[in-house]
Image (cartoon, helix red, strand yellow):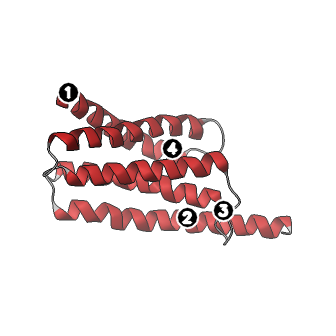
């Protein structure tokens, strides 16, 4: 069973990392973005759930994996909720900004896991993706918020 979980975890992580850039670069509308996004969601779900399974085999050593899996699934559910519901959000940040923020956070988790695995748990690998990724996600979120404000001004709202 452990071998199956490792394979699911590795394949999910690889698929998620390979799809990240195409999903980010695809035009944000129905079509390529949503199709690739669904596959990415499947990969993130597989990654998060397999993290819990692996944690069960060695809790003392893999607590960080379980934490990353829980955060990834939480951000994933939140990002999907905003994309599906598209709620009216006050304060200048529309639903798309929240979607970008949460899905970007799942990507940070993918990169963090990859970095930790390839550096054999180096402390920098735990924090560098979060610092760099958070700056990039904040920039993308700010750009989306500014885009939303321009739309509101143009529409006369």
Q: Quadrant of residue 150?
A: bottom right
Label 3 sits on a secondary structure element that is loop
Q: How many marks?
A: 4
The residue carrying mark 2 is 141
Label 3 environment density (alpha carbons within 10 Å; few <14, some 14–19, many ≥20): many
Closest to the camera, between mark 1 and mark 3, is 1
- Which residue position holds label 1? 1
> How many angstroms separate mark 2 from mark 3 (CA)?
10 Å
Between discs 3 and 4, the one toward the N terminus: 4
Relative image position of residue 70 (x, y in whole percent)? 35, 51
**Disc 4 on helix, strand or loop?**
helix
Q: Earlier in the sequence, mark 1 or mark 2?
A: 1
Q: Residue at x 23, y 27 (%)?
A: 4
Disc 3 + disc 4, Cβ < 8 Å: no
Describe the element under mark 1 as helix, strand or loop: loop
Determine the image quadrant of residue 14. Answer: top left
* Foreground tag (2 vs 3): 3
Tag in front: 3 or 4: 3
Residue 94 is tagged as 3
Q: Residue at x 66, y 72 (%)?
A: 91
- Pair 2/4: label in front: 2
The single residue placed furthest to the right in the displayed view is 156
> Mark 4 or mark 1: which comes first in sequence?
1
Where 64 sits versus 7, above or below?
below
Contact? badges 4 and 1 (CB < 8 Å) = no
Tell me the tag on residue 23.
Answer: 4
């Amino acid at each position: 069973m452990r071998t199956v979980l490792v394979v699911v975890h590795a394949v999910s992580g690889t698929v998620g990392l390979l799809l990240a850039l195409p999903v980010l670069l695809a035009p944000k509308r129905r079509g390529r973005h949503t199709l690739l996004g669904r596959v990415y969601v499947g990969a993130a779900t597989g990654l998060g759930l397999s993290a819990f399974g692996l944690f069960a085999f060695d809790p003392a050593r893999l607590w960080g994996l379980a934490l990353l899996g829980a955060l990834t699934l939480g951000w994933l559910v939140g990002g999907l909720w905003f994309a599906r519901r598209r709620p009216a959000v006050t304060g200048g940040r529309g639903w798309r900004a929240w979607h970008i923020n949460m899905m970007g956070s799942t990507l940070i988790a993918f990169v963090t896991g990859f970095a930790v695995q390839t550096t054999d748990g180096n402390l920098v690998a735990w924090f560098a993706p979060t610092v760099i990724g958070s700056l990039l996600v904040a920039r993308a979120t700010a750009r989306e918020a500014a885009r939303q404000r321009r739309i509101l001004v143009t529409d006369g709202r």
